[in-house]
Amino acid sequence: MVDVQITAELKMKLKRRVGVMVTLGNTVIFAKRALIRMRKNPEQLFDAVFSPVLFTLLFAFLLGGAVAGSVSSYLPILIPGVLVMTTLTSCGTAATQIKEDMDKSSTKRFKAMPISRFAPVAGVLVADLLRFAIAGSIVFITGFFLGFAPDAGIWSVFASLFLVMFVGWCFSWLFAWIGMLMKSATGASMFTWLIMFPLTFLSNAFVPAETLPMALKFFVDYINPLTKVISAVREMLYVGTIGSDFWFAILGSLVVLVIFVPLTLYAYNRKT
């Protein structure tokens, strides 16, 4: 019999970190996993499919005459607002999915695998870009049927959609972190709506900021981050330029990303 020397686990020279390429590969795999879950559970996409149509039609015919005199005159105000609203209110879905994995102890199995600790969270958030793309596309399609026509041409539609998708993806890290602090997936979803709905309505999404009382106008113009995003989208759609609001939106989103990526990963590793 051959004697085999067994090395204690603590003395073994094992890699504590994986490389960038391995991390990217793991992230793609977890993104595919999230997409498969969407395909097998299509109700997960109901908010991205039906909410854009519902909100666009509801606000167009309910507020169009009161705010702008007609539906067609209200569309330049409405479409960018609904675009941002439906995209960013979908950010909490990823937080709900991550929380469900944690509740089912799936994350404990992931942690036992020789994979990147970044991938299980990032994969879900990358897959959520499909949700943002679907929601934004349906907003524009519904708007086109109502008579919406951007002055800057079709390129501005794609540019504004990419901007909102990027902002939504950055904010998804914030809501993923909040979701991990909640006790249940339902609580994570509800808390997201409680944050995003006031921010959306207390902005220039559906009414001009000039019509608001002074205190609300100050909040809309100088505190609410969604105001810059909506203004940037309107400028791209109707002026065809990229101005200061665009760069403020990008900068603010990057700040959210830098702050909440490490916080989210820390909370994820601590909870699992």
Image (spheres, rainbow, N blue to C red):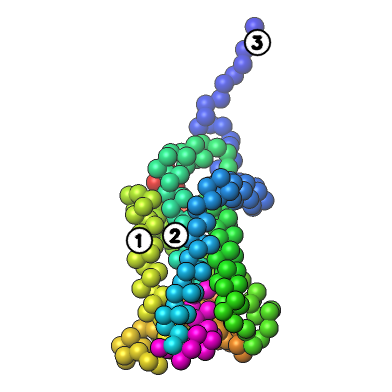
Q: Amino acid at mark 1?
A: Phe
The magenta stretch spans which residues? 66-83
Q: Position of residue 246 (x, y in %)?
A: 56, 81
Q: Which residue is mark 2?
A: 92
Quarter of the rendering occupied by the N terminus = top right
Residue 70 colored in magenta in the image: yes
Q: Are marks 2 and 1 in contact (CB under 8 Å)?
A: yes
Which mark lies nearer to you, 3 or 1?
Answer: 1
Between marks 2 and 3, how big is the CA–CA gap?
57 Å
Q: Amino acid at mark 2?
A: Gly
Label disc, if present, on residue 172 of the rendered structure: none
Determine whether 122 is above or below 230 in the image. above
Please state which of residues 173 and 198 is positioned toward the viewer in this rendering. 198
Q: Residues within 10 Å of mark 1 (few under 14, many from 20)?
A: some
Left or right for 56, reference 239: left
Quarter of the rendering occupied by the C terminus = top left
Q: Position of residue 122 (x, y in %)?
A: 55, 54
Q: Earlier in the sequence, mark 2 or mark 3?
A: 3
Determine whether 256 is above or below 262 in the image. below
Between marks 2 and 1, how big is the CA–CA gap?
8 Å
Q: Which residue is mark 3?
A: 2
Q: Which residue is mark 1?
A: 191
Label 3 SS: loop
Q: Main secondary structure of the magenta part?
A: helix
Q: Earlier in the sequence, mark 2 or mark 1?
A: 2
Q: Amino acid at mark 3?
A: Val
Which mark lies nearer to you, 2 or 3?
Answer: 2
Q: Position of residue 271 (x, y in %)?
A: 39, 46
Q: Residue at x 61, y 77 (%)?
A: 144
Q: Residue at x 31, y 90 (%)?
A: 213
Q: Residue at x 58, y 35 (%)?
A: 13
Left or right for 6, reference 198: right
